[in-house]
Structures are given as structure tokens and as C-alpha cells.
Image: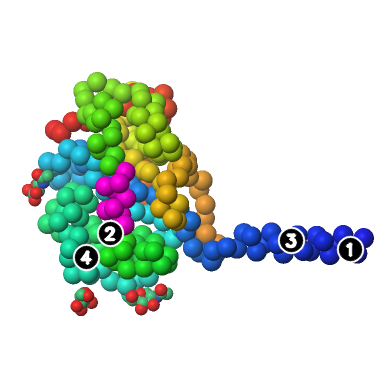
């Protein structure tokens, strides 16, 4: 009996050490979020007139943490060499000449991503986001497999199928629902997920609503909710809007 208890203790110790490989507040997954400019601009930002007809970056989000270090200020001179690519690949669709979007993303998500040594500077964070964006090259892959903006509707499974076949991982695809009674949904955002070593990983289609001990939202879903995107409905036709 005593021996068995000791064995159980050992087992418990072994298990707990196996699960505590990373610090408790460390992220384990990154979400590379692309948005479709026409949809973004059509939603809640009527002031923005998109002249861009390719998928652009919304952000690179760790799965844990929001606003992790408010004293670590965004400084665009630290990413000077990346700026031409930032403007093209990660444009602020509302205010193209402003760095406000990057500043926002850095404070909200970058300062949390920076808990990992691989992303612990602004140059590493933005540089890695751009690198992953180009490596994934989502816009070209969709075009290559004939998923292009169209007045005809797609089935969600067509879009999902192309991505799953090509990358061998499950994306998270988000839509805007124009109204409660609309019989179609508008393609808005596509997320591709990565492990902490930047290898591809399945995204969870539906984030579970987790709350932290403080009762705050601790998941990127809070961001999605705020922006009006939700996971696309499997059965509803998908509108992939051309440049208006
Ligand atoms: C879109 O328009 C903005 C503002 O007029 C301009 O700065 C930007 O270069 C344009 N982008 C493209 C891809 O044409
Ligand atoms: C927050 O950022 C500042 C400025 O880079 C740095 O000196 C400080 O160590 C950071 N704090 C934490 C908790 O990482
Ligand atoms: C921004 O970064 C540059 C280059 O590292 C540095 O010289 C400058 O002092 C920084 N600015 C601020 C406000 O921290």
C-alpha cells in the first residue's frame, strides 16, 4: 500500500513536470491572421476605400495574453528596413499613411509574443510576421486553385478544401454576416496557425471561451467579436467580394 502511494506520488510529480515545460503564461501557438480588404472596409469602416485586391496581414497573435507590457513602446525606427514591406503586406486600411495599426498590434499582441526569445524585439516580431505571411502566400494559393473574388457564391468547403489540401492543416475562416436574415455570408478573415517553432498547426475552428482568473477574456476571440467576424457557417453560401 505504502509503495503504491509512493509510486503514485512519483507519477504525479513526473506528470506535473511534463506539463510545466513552459511558464504558465507563455503562449504555445501563433495565429497568423489575414483579412480581405473589401470586406474589412465594407463592414464598419465606410470611410476606408480599399484599393487593394490581395489578402493583407491583420496580425500575428499568440494564443495567450493581451497587452503584456505597456511600457514597451512601438518605435518604427526599429523596423525601418521592414517598412516598405509593412506598407504593402500589413497596411492600415483606414489610414494608409499612419503607423497606428502596427503600434496597436505591437502593444496588444507583439508585447505578448515577445515573451519568447524568438520574438523578443520589435524587429523580430514584425520580421517574423512578414516572413510567415510570405511563406504562406495565401493570396497566390487561393488564386492558383481558382478561389478568386466573384459575384458567384462559393461553398465554404471549397475554400476550406483548397487550404487544407495545400497546407495540410485546418485554417480558421471567418465571415461577416450582413444581417440576421441574410442568406449569404461574406468572407472576411483567414487564420493560419503555427507552433512556437513556426511549423504549421491546425487552428481550432471554434475557440473555447476561456476566462482568466481575473475574469478577463484571454483569447483572440474577444478581438474577433469586437470586429464583427465570426467563424463562417458551414452551410451558408460565401460571398468573396471583388473590389468595389
Ligand atoms: C492605395 O491608396 C493609398 C492612398 O491613396 C496609397 O498610398 C497606396 O499606395 C495604394 N495602394 C495600392 C496597392 O495601390
Ligand atoms: C517591458 O518592456 C520594457 C522596455 O522594453 C523592458 O525594459 C521591461 O523589462 C519589460 N518588462 C517585462 C515584464 O517584460
Ligand atoms: C527608437 O529606436 C531608435 C533606434 O533604435 C532609437 O535611436 C530611438 O531613441 C528610439 N526612440 C524612442 C522614442 O525610444
In the image, is residue 47 part of the stretch drawn in magenta?
Answer: no
Quadrant containing the N terminus in the rendered view: bottom right
**Tag 2, which secondary structure?**
helix
The structure residue drawn at horizontal position 25% and vertical position 30%, both measured from the top left corner, is 144
The residue singled out by tag 4 in the image is: 79
Q: Considering only order in the chain, which callout, 1 or 3, is on the residue closer to the N terminus?
A: 1
Please tell me how crowded label 4 is: few (under 14), some (14-19), or many (20+) other residues with Cα within 10 Å.
some
Q: Considering only order in the chain, which callout, 3 or 4, is on the residue closer to the N terminus?
A: 3
Q: CA distance from mark 1 to mark 2?
A: 54 Å
Instruction: Answer whether labels 1 and 2 touch (C-beta < 8 Å).
Output: no
The residue singled out by tag 1 in the image is: 3
Looking at the image, can residue 147 be seen?
no
Measured from the top left, where is residue 174 in percent x and y? Answer: 36, 38
The structure residue drawn at horizontal position 22% and vertical position 69%, both measured from the top left corner, is 78
In the image, is residue 128 part of the stretch drawn in magenta?
Answer: yes
The structure residue drawn at horizontal position 67% and vertical position 62%, both measured from the top left corner, is 16
Looking at the image, can residue 122 be seen?
yes
The residue singled out by tag 3 in the image is: 12
Instruction: Answer whether labels 2 and 3 touch (C-beta < 8 Å).
Output: no
**Tag 4, which secondary structure?**
helix
Q: Is mark 2 within 8 Å of ligand 3?
A: no
Q: Which of 175/91 is in front?
A: 91
Amino acid at each position: 500500500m505504502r509503495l503504491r502511494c509512493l509510486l503514485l506520488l512519483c507519477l504525479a510529480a513526473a506528470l506535473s513536470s511534463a506539463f510545466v515545460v513552459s511558464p504558465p503564461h507563455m503562449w504555445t501557438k501563433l495565429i497568423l491572421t489575414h483579412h480581405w480588404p473589401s470586406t474589412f472596409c465594407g463592414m464598419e469602416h465606410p470611410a476606408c476605400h480599399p484599393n487593394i485586391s490581395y489578402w493583407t496581414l491583420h496580425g500575428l497573435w499568440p494564443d495567450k495574453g493581451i497587452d503584456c507590457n505597456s511600457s514597451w513602446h512601438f518605435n518604427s525606427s526599429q523596423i525601418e528596413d521592414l517598412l516598405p514591406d509593412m506598407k504593402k503586406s500589413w497596411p492600415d486600411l483606414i489610414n494608409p499613411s499612419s503607423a497606428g495599426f502596427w503600434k496597436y498590434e505591437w502593444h496588444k499582441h507583439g508585447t505578448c509574443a515577445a515573451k519568447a526569445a524568438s520574438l523578443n524585439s520589435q524587429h523580430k516580431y514584425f520580421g517574423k510576421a512578414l516572413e510567415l505571411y510570405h511563406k504562406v502566400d495565401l493570396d497566390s494559393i487561393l488564386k492558383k486553385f481558382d478561389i478568386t473574388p466573384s459575384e458567384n457564391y462559393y461553398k465554404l468547403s471549397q475554400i476550406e478544401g483548397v487550404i487544407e489540401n495545400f497546407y495540410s492543416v485546418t485554417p480558421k475562416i471567418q465571415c461577416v454576416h450582413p444581417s440576421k436574415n441574410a442568406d449569404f455570408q461574406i468572407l472576411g478573415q483567414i487564420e493560419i496557425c503555427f507552433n512556437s517553432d513556426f511549423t504549421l498547426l491546425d487552428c481550432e475552428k471554434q475557440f473555447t471561451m476561456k476566462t482568466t482568473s481575473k475574469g478577463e477574456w484571454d483569447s483572440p476571440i474577444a478581438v474577433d467579436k469586437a470586429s464583427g467576424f465570426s467563424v463562417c457557417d458551414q452551410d451558408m453560401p460565401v460571398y468573396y467580394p471583388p473590389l468595389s
